[in-house]
Amino acid sequence: MANLPEPYNESFLPLIQKFYSLEAIAREPWDPSTILFVPLKKQILLENGGAETFATVIYLSILNLNFEIKRVKNVNEISPSGRGPLLKCGKYSIGEYESIVNFSNLKGYRLLANFLDSSKKNEIKSYMLLIQSSYSDTLNYFLWKSDGVQKAIKESFSSDYPWPLNIILYWNEYYFKRKYLQSNNLWDLKKDKVMHRFSEVNECLNKKLKDNAYLMGNNMTEVDILLYSFIKVLTINSVFEELNASLGDLTHLRDYFAKMDQNMA
């Protein structure tokens, strides 16, 4: 591993080593015909509101990497990790934002801010986990515990799949998400408890940003792109209006998002 570009999260390596040679990944150039498979517009709400899709598109675009976006209705089924978005780069198929970031790092493509010491890399890993866990859990709670949202979700399955497949797939997804929320001790919680846990994380992030332009200091990293994408999802989906409103008093986090949003325009 000494001669390979280092991904910020080495826990990614055993997973990808099951399928691919790390040396080959680092050696081969970026395929100009790379495709990023993302959910259909009607389905994207189910995937954390599309946060990881937004983050992946932003990340690859900032690095000026060639890729084409292709919307498909079965992105989770064709992804080796079971979740999208899915990057098809040459012979490699990589699912989910964090793994795509690490895949790009191995090939030598990274944000300048990622040439960091080990302590900063560990801090990035910690914040990636914190943000992914808190936002993903909370968004899934609001999606799958709301009767009004469930009606819209059922309609999205009905419009994309024939009967009875639409019913089967809906209930399969419902039970999968319920089990996921139960395993994280969220399913049986009252909404105010979920909101409290979400607010605690955001207060921590707000405090972190008090004296920093970005989470890691003065330079943007992929963890900033992920956080920005999650907050963006809150601002554009009425389903998450209450979550978005909960950020109102967190001045540093709000200013941070506004600055990021202006930079992404």
Image: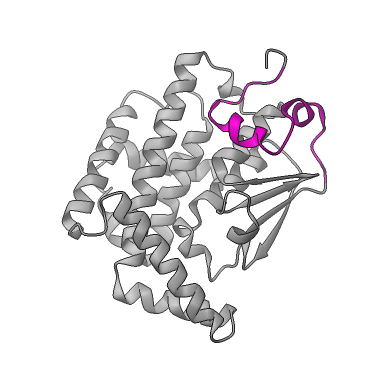
How many numbered circles does the render carry? 0
Locate residue 114: give its quadrant. Answer: top right
Residue in view at x 62 percent, y 40 percent = 100
Residue 249 at least partly seen: no
Q: Residue furthest bottom?
A: 163
Q: Position of residue 132 (x, y in %)?
A: 42, 43
Residue nearer the viewer, 211 or 114? 114
In the rendered image, the quadrant that contains the N terminus is top right
Q: Is residue 10 in view?
A: yes
Residue 232 as seen in the image, left or right of residue 137: right
**As drawn, is 18 to the left or to the right of 34?**
left
Q: Position of residue 82 (x, y in %)?
A: 56, 54
Q: Is residue 137 left or right of residue 117?
A: left
Residue 228 falls inside the magenta stretch: no
Residue 8: quadrant of the picture: top right
Q: Position of residue 47 (x, y in %)?
A: 49, 59
Q: How are the residues colored?
A: one colour
Residue located at (66% from left, 36% from top): 18
> Is residue 15 shown above or below 176?
above
Residue 47 higher or lower than 90, as above or below: below
Q: Is residue 164 above or below residue 145?
A: below
Residue at the location (28% across, 39% down)?
201
Residue at image position (37%, 43%) is 133
The residue at the far front in this view is 18
Magenta run includes residue 16: yes
Q: Over which residues does the magenta segment extend?
A: 4-32
- x then y, percent, for residue 151: 38, 79
